[in-house]
Image (tube, rainbow, N blue to C red):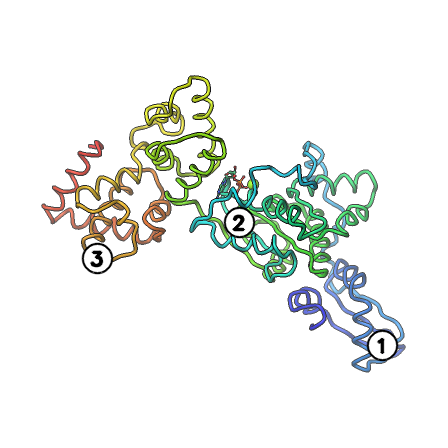
Amino acid sequence: MEKIGPSSFETWFRTTDLSVNQDGTAKILVPNQFFADFIEEHFTTLIKETLTVEQIQFNSLIFVPTQKDWKIVQPLSEEIAEAQSKQIPHKVEKLEQYHSNYTFSKFVVGDNNRMAHAASLAVAEAPGKTSFNPLIIYGGTGLGKTHLLQAIGHFAQTEVTADRVIYMTSEEFTNQYINYVVNKKDSTSFYKKFHDVDLLLIDDIQFFSGKPGTQKEFFRIFNKLLLENKQIVLSSDRQPDKITDMMEHIINRFMGGLTTDIQPPNLETRMAILRKKAEIDGLFLSDEVVQFIAGNITSNIRELEGTLIKLIASASFTGRDITIEVAQELCGDAITKKDERLSVMLIQEKVAEAFGISANQLSAHTRKKEVAHPRSIAMYLCKKWTKQSLRSIGLDFGGRDYSTVIHSFKKIEGDLETDTELREKVTAIENILQVL
Ligand code: ADP
Ligand code: MG
């Protein structure tokens, strides 16, 4: 175990056994043919050495699969058909092919992605030399997974922390693998493509789901690279163990590294991202407009960017300044109905005003009654009048848990039945918000 590390040991030797026949044949019992091939290819010398050290007499070594699972060596016909029906662009292997905006310097760090960002930077600086191997980043769409993966690749190439880097999506991987199998009738040459890779980045591994042939090939490459301490970084739109039809061996193997998530950004981070993007595009946005957009577009960052692109187009076509009215007009599709337009931010602002505190205090981590009470009211109103999920409301109140939002909502709802003064106060705020 000292020689190959605990996680490789777990994978390859926990389930193996040894018996030596009278004729001197050492039999290594392994779960299946795949294990037999992999262990034979990578560990024969090590096993022979170990047997010698342990003074076990043998004259030959054979690998015997004990189960007949993992029979599929070739991809399924569905896998082939699906891959062939898609035209997938070529993977990024050269620096100039990375998206120029997807670098670390253009990535805004917030509470929602701090860990994923730190781990990404660490592996980019020292690929294969941290304990984050493999590094797996998961999270909903448009939250920055591809940005981080490409930033790692970009960094490793500009700072030359890795000689050979491959970035590809899982679909490109599948497609290329199938092409090799179909055209060359074997996958050896595909496997060889990865032989001198120092850093392998595979985006959106959820698409490996239900493709056993591809998964097996991926598993083979993945394990080979890990054995050689090469860095692997993967992304997925959900937690790896929630990917259906993914081989258990693969999932278990992920445990040896670091799995970290990206959450939806809170208001503050959305505003910071918007400012950064505007700056990159050389567009001036007033604080009011930034607040308006970030306060209304909450689902994902791609949508936030889409709105910005519209604003840029409008600014350049009409020569108009971007005022809040222009922003409202242009965001029409994203923010139409009145109740949707009512943002968490506006509610926070009006509630804070009504209680003579600042809106920022509502997100602060204090339990002082002067703040906690208005905060509960603001949460109540957000749940009642916006379409935001409890989770997203919680995030906009200083990253609080959704259970806090529910708790506050129930508390205020209950109190409203008996407390006239409270009822008047809340109704007054609702009037200001023009929701009644
Ligand atoms: P995913 O791969 O998770 O679906 P992307 O990485 O494609 O998401 O991100 C969508 C868009 O949002 C990209 O243009 C990306 O630059 C931007 N983005 C996401 N997170 C951030 C961030 N923290 N800072 C700056 N831009 C971001
Ligand atoms: Mg992506």
Which residue, as the protein is rendered here, is positioned at the far top?
318
Mark 2 element type = strand
Q: Which residue corresponds to mark 3?
A: 368
Q: Earlier in the sequence, mark 1 or mark 2?
A: 1
* Residue 21: mark: 1
Q: Which residue corresponds to mark 2?
A: 138
Q: Residue 360: horizontal and vertical position, in percent?
A: 28, 47
Q: Residue 392: horizontal and vertical position, in percent?
A: 37, 45
Q: Residue 387: horizontal and vertical position, in percent?
A: 33, 38
What's the amino acid at mark 1?
Asn
Residue at position x 16%, y 50% in the image: 415
Q: Decide: is 81 above or below 250.
A: above
What's the amino acid at mark 3?
Lys
Mark 1 element type = loop
Instruction: Classify the position of the C terminus by image quarter.
Output: top left
Which residue, as the protein is rendered here, is positioned at the far left?
420
